[in-house]
Amino acid sequence: MENIEKHQYDVVVIGAGGAGLRAAIEARLAGKKTAIISKSLFGKAHTVMAEGGAAAAMGNVNSNDNWMVHFRDTMRGGKFLNNFRMAELHAKEAPDRIWELETYGALFDRTKDGKISQRNFGGHEYPRLAHVGDRTGLELIRTLQQKIVSLQQEDYQEYGDYDARIKVFAETTITELLLDDSDGTTRVAGAFGYYRESGGFVLFEAPAVILATGGVGKSYKVTSNSWEYTGDGHALALRAGATLINMEFLQFHPTGMVWPPSVKGILVTESVRGDGGVLKNSEGKRFMFDYVPDVFRKQYAETPEEGDRWYTDPDNNRRPPELLPRDEVARAINSEVKAGRGTKAGGVYLDIASRLPAASILKKLPSMYHQFKELADVDITKEPMEVGPTCHYVMGGVEVDPDSQATKVAGLFAAGEVSGGMHGSNRLGGNSLSDLLVFGKRAGEYAAAYTEELTGRPAVTASDLDSAVEAALAPLQRAGGENPYSLHHELQQVMGDLVGIIRRQGELEESLGRLAELRERVTKVGSTGGRRYNPGWHLALDLRNMLIVSECTAKAALEREESRGGHTREDFPKMDPKWRQINLVCSVTPSGDVALAQQPVPTMRPDLLGLFEESELAKYMTEEELA
Amino acid sequence: MSVRQFKVWRGDSAGGQLNHYQVEVNEGEVVLDVIHRLQATQEPDLACRWNCKAGKCGSCSMEINGMPRLGCMTRMSTFEEDETVTITPLRTFPVIRDLVTDVSYNYTKARETPAFAPPEDVAPGEYRMQQVDVDRSQEFRKCIECFLCQNTCHVVRDHEENKHPFSGPRFFIRAAELDMHPLDARADRKEYAQNSMGLGYCNITKCCTEVCPEHIKITDNAIIPMKERVVDRRYDPLVRLGRKILRRDQLEQEEVAVTTLHAAQPTPQPDGAAPINWHRELPPPMGADLGEDGQLPLNELASDRMGANSPFGDDVQFPVDPKNLNYYHPGDSDH
């Protein structure tokens, strides 16, 4: 009989990135006994990779900015597929969430009058991103981490135990959510997983669980995401009976490093372009002027001269097209490479060296300089960078209530990248850091409130626990099974080649066949070695999550016959207003297959609709909607 | 592409050994790529921490040819084609398995370091600070918590007994960061560092600064100012003046010391052996200089030095001869 360590908490947060930590802080402040489950060490979460900043309409640099402008930019960026209520809450609450961080000890870069400085970023009308050089994500995670430590110090004062009310379980992976449907409603009862260090199993009994597990990028070959990004939260939610929306929308960051090979996928922040960097093809042509879509034509410069003037005089000039939303830039680079005007490594050049003096590059982009120098021996003050599209962010995720972040399963909440709807078909840069603060807080608050309403604690059943143990041990008992590393490699290949940035019906159909084959083989995956810190075993367990989430993406991508934001169909290159009204919803059937359904996108309130000019709405909406 | 030689430490808390591997290496790869290839092709259960693979998270800390480094930031092109690359776990922390060590010491120290104290009379959104005033703290907030500085610091590297009283360079910069924070409401950061974090144990050999992948000037910008200001507050003005003069002399010596270290040849590493002898005994620390009466000087005025006595004995001269270091010291070729 397996020995399982048991813990009881009020709120269990799975994931220790920005959303998870912010949710945990809120739950603890609401007086709930809170556990934070981190797949890595505390403070290593993928949030540290965010460079540009956190978008919040504080109006510190341009006082014309306010939540309505931010809301408009977010909806435009998401091509009006966003959950309007989430976009509204996000735009309204982001400034408070940023200011709050200063009371936790964050040190943002400052304006001359001592306020938080804000920088320009793709898709944002005004300078809006609170930032710290180009390491804003690190500042955010460290600040939240240190706030948790400070709460623990308070508890130590009061109870003599740092872990009395909030505890971090580092290097712990959750493999299954456990449910209780004894009263007719399916409720979360706990979460089961293992400690990486010992391989020992652990059960968290809790009435409320918040998923904050981040994204799915590890299913792709060229990705900026770390090993943790295996879609755990997406898969846990699906298996528990919740639904995913918008899974066809993946953001490919337009400028990831493509050379040298070992750092393929590492991102080059958009602020390189915001500060003057331009994209050139192998013929030396600044090509973005050829790729401004009609909907954006009015806001962007038509000549390099006008674009260049914008950096110093943004009020009288239009911005250069290098600052178009990410998907437009990614698509433009892809077209250049496909037309044979790319570099040998399959990218284009991003040139800041010839545009700014070396000293200002060093001042504005210190860690970028550092990264390129150390990793690639490239001096960005002297030579251009080689960049190309990289899988970066998944817009889709667990379907949640916009106010409370509650999923379809009672007691299960989701916040941050793992949740869906906020960003529609495409996320603006800078909106993810503010997203995870705004909705992390809300998830923590509403999860705490949910536990108040409960009359009794949901209970874990012994049989569910047994099957979770069995599933977790299975790969170790199949010593001669399939190699998890090769399966992972094949999955990345299938997703990269067939469900990548530009999609076609035939390829998507082929991908579904290949994924079905892989699913069969993943059931036979085996790992050698023991249970203590065995990465082969951990990968074997992650594979089934990656696979089911990849199936959702492939199925939804095949179904959506249009191009919008992070979903580009070569066979349906136009945006179709009819498809704007439809969300694709994935669920899992009892037999374990992915089921896809169409569901109407919530209709925007008239007061929010009124923020847009009718001529703009006409680009996105059907005539019936406008009438 | 070429096949290169590697030695990787495998084992757990009960013991282990350096295993020999031949692994393919492609142009532009880093040591962490090699470890991943090793996992995928030869040793699926080789334990190693990593996350971002971009030098931003500080997870893949290890010792490469005896030098504390990030695996993702160590390019294979920095080694000779025929050189055997030896990869061992961080030495200061207990081994869990293979390259993974128990770094909980650092999290314990993090908890013990008093958190930011927000000013009571400033509402959120009303914080006003000048860039020039936050620059200094921002340098320390670049820290990615790779713990290489903690690993290399000789106060704890071979002195388990010092771990209790000594928080280490990572948390000295945390204390300095808060000390220099324009709005932090606590005024006793330096005294706390001196009295409760073991700042006095540090004898500014700058090893931490040297291994920092973020190039934070830990010693010059955090530790020395903290020590100086502790002195400022603890002693009367007259003595302080005298100390300052002494201080400056010592600092100048420090500059020279670093140059000497860099000029030194790397410790020769016999083939087939670990770059350092993990079991070697160091000379025991000498006690403090006692007065004629066999006692410590009664007041600091009579003492010939400032601050606490070094746990290594005050007879130790810095820089220590590289041959007598209990860790492998790199030469210029490693930079």
Image (cartoon, rainbow, N blue to C red):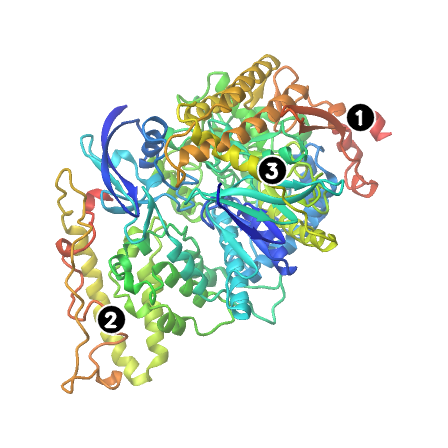
Compare residues B304 and B153 and report the one nearer the observer: B153
- Chain at tag 1: A
Say whether mark 2 and mark 1 are on the same chain: no
Q: Which mark is residue A622?
A: 1
Q: Are marks 3 and 2 in contact (CB under 8 Å)?
A: no
**Mark 3 or mark 1, which has the lower sequence index?**
3
- Chain at tag 3: A
Say whether mark 2 and mark 3 are on the same chain: no
The residue that mark 2 highlights is: B248
How many C-alpha atoms fall within 10 Å of the one at disc 1: few (<14), some, or many (≥20)?
A: some
Q: Alpha-carbon distance for marks 3 and 1?
A: 51 Å
- Chain at tag 2: B
Considering only vertical position in the picture, is A371 above or below A59?
Answer: above
Q: Amino acid at mark 2?
A: Arg
Secondary structure type for disc 3: helix
Compare residues A472 and A500 and report the one nearer the observer: A472
How many C-alpha atoms fall within 10 Å of the one at disc 2: few (<14), some, or many (≥20)?
A: few
In this rendering, position of residue B204 left or right of residue B171: left
Q: Residue furthest right?
A: A627
Q: Amino acid at mark 3?
A: Ser
Residue B104 percent location from the top left of the image:
40, 55
The residue that mark 3 highlights is: A463
